[in-house]
Image (cartoon, rainbow, N blue to C red):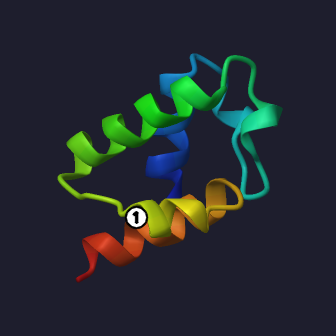
Amino acid sequence: MDKKNIYNEIADYFNVSNSCIFDATVASDVNGWDSLTHVMLILHIEEIYNVEFTPVELSKLENVYSFYILLNEKLTK
């Protein structure tokens, strides 16, 4: 999976430019990305890619790149 796919999905979800989402992006970098929209984004990604994340997996997320790595691992299993 190309990481641009998930980065574009996140940008679209928050209605920001794709150039605003990069490897080191964290929630506080994106206007409107708070705890509620974080959960909603996770559910959105789970639905789109037909995956499920565990609370332990989600607790290890540090930035957008770590989210991409986790999703990619799920998709290649």
Q: Quadrant of residue 53?
A: bottom left
Q: Which residue lies most toward the left here?
A: 50
Q: Is residue 5 left or right of residue 24?
A: left
The residue sitting at 46% across, 35% down in the picture is: 39
- Residue ID for mark 1: 71
Q: Of 39 and 76, which appears nearest the observer?
A: 39
The answer, for residue 47, to whether it is visible in the render is yes
Quadrant for the N terminus in the image: bottom left
Q: Amino acid at mark 1?
A: Leu
Point out residue 8 in the picture as x, y percentages from the top left corner.
51, 38
Compared with residue 30, is residue 27 higher up or lower down, i.e. above or below?
below
Quadrant for the C terminus in the image: bottom left
Point out residue 49 in the picture as x, y percentages from the top left corner.
24, 51
Q: Quadrant of residue 26?
A: top right
The residue sitting at 82% across, 34% down in the picture is: 29
Q: Is residue 34 left or right of residue 72?
A: right
The answer, for residue 2, to whether it is visible in the render is no
Q: Is residue 17 left or right of residue 9?
A: right
